[in-house]
Image: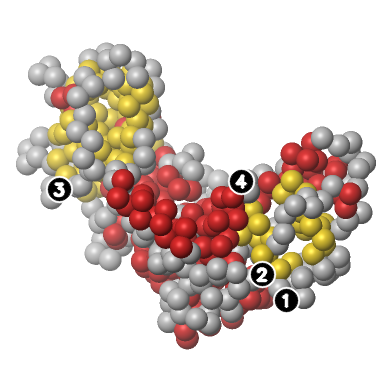
Amino acid sequence: MSATRVFVARLAGCTVFDPAGDRVGKVRDVLVVYRKNDPPLVVGLIVEIPGKRRVFVSISRVTSIGSGQIITTGLINVRRFEQRGGEVRVIAEMLGRTVVFNDGSGEATVEDVSIEESAQGGWAISQLFVRRPKTSLSLFAKGATAFAAWGEVREHATVGQAQSAEQLIATYSDLKPADLANTLLDLPQERMYEVAGELPDGRLADVLEEMPEREQVGILTRLGDARAADVLDHMQPDDAADLIAQLPEEHGEQLLDLMEPEEADDVRFLLTYAPDTAGGLMTTEPIIVSADATVAEGLALIRRHDLAPALGAAICVTLPPYEPPTGRFLGMVHFQRMLRYPPHERLGTLLDQGLDPVTADTSAAEVTRILASYDLVSVPVVDDNHRLVGVVTIDDVLDYLLPDDWRSHDGNDDVRRRAAARTELTTGSIPLHHGRRTGNGPS
């Protein structure tokens, strides 16, 4: 191999190639097994391949590690990775652990682990990069760092003390929320809770939106009501409503009372709609402007970095007020249309006259057909008084239609299942009811 010592944290996200130079996937972790008298032995890599599936690549299949890339023999078993007893993931389970120096000099926290190739071609842990507790009272001070051989330290954990997740979070800081959610779902349950608990509120909110309901509820209930309410404040109102509806009604009301009043009002508003209707699928935070707003103003609004792409695809034009439920809905202006006109052009003159809104009680099947038939990214939702109450985006519909296990699904649907799905869409009898509210809205 081209490298003899590698630090594991630097491997996270490295691209894996086959001998022909074709990309196989990305490294997500290194798997080791403990030995009685020797340092842990590296048995392989956990690699994420297309389709967000994590597979095991034996270290014997790795021919080169270096320069930010890994080359394999090309022979990879694409069966989904399942951790076995005795196996330990270095990034997910070792970083952040507390170790004690055998010489009595104190404790330290593991920040990185180096693996080294032996003369026989195997790999094992060689050194730990650790940080001792800080000795200064300054808020910006950090403890001294040191390298320690595996035999110079021993692991130490106080009963009931959670393992620090700070280093793991730093390692995965560049992951998109969906990828981080998948990473957390692959962790042992207790470790998942520990890592989730140390994520910032906004980051945790983004991750929860990408998780199945059971894990969402498990994490939220472990946070405590005060912090859970803060996280819900950061979530999109429709996702927060979906999550609260999975909780016992009394607990859900407690969290709503602790949330910011404006955010809680949006969630309560969504909970009044049946889950299989446009009202149950919509988000209440589209871009809304007056007819006198200009193209320049509209483009500035869709440039916001925190705006979901589907919501930035079009702007809603209404009469005042401009918060749902608004004044009378006038129409939508698609961003491509704005690009064709000068900055001073009024948006009220650019309305899409061919797009009709749906009502809040329109079925999910009908909304799906409208989006597909007219190649739309979003469709406006109005109430009986033609006031805008929200928009249903394509991702809202996909979340509704996909099965509960879509995040872990291998993507090998057969023709019969696809045909059945087409039949359901055609007849309007979509029985799938996944990720939507079931408790508090009217049926």
- Residue 82 placement (x, y as % from top left): 20, 47
Find the distance from the CA under tag 4 to the CA under tag 1.
Answer: 26 Å
Q: Are marks 4 and 1 in contact (CB under 8 Å)?
A: no
Q: Is 240 rendered above or below residue 401? A: below
Which of the two labelled residues, at mark 2 and mark 1, occupies the earlier sequence position?
2
Q: Is 361 rendered above or below residue 304? A: below
Q: Secondary structure at mark 3?
A: loop
Which of the two labelled residues, at mark 3 and mark 1, occupies the earlier sequence position?
3
Quadrant in the rendering for residue 357: bottom right
Find the distance from the CA under tag 3 to the CA under tag 2.
Answer: 51 Å
Q: Is 30 rendered above or below residue 5? A: below
Between 281 and 305, the residue placed more toward the observer is 281
Q: Is residue 130 visible?
A: no
Find the distance from the CA under tag 2 to the CA under tag 1.
Answer: 7 Å
Q: Are marks 3 and 2 in contact (CB under 8 Å)?
A: no
Q: Which mark is residue 384?
A: 1
Q: Which mark is residue 84?
A: 3
- Residue 36 placement (x, y as % from top left): 6, 41
Q: Which mark is residue 359?
A: 2
Find the distance from the CA under tag 3 to the CA under tag 4.
Answer: 46 Å
- Residue 145 placement (x, y as % from top left): 38, 36
Residue in the image at 32% along x and 60% along y: 162
Name the kind of residue labelled 1 in the image: Asp
Which of the two labelled residues, at mark 4 and mark 1, occupies the earlier sequence position?
4
Name the kind of residue labelled 2 in the image: Thr
Find the distance from the CA under tag 3 to the CA under tag 1.
Answer: 57 Å
Q: Nearer the viewer, mark 3 or mark 2?
A: 2
Residue in the image at 23% along x and 53% along y: 156
Q: Are marks 2 and 1 in contact (CB under 8 Å)?
A: yes
Q: Secondary structure at mark 4?
A: loop
Query: For the residue carrying disc 1, how many other residues have a C-alpha within 10 Å: few (<14), some (14-19), or many (20+)?
Result: few
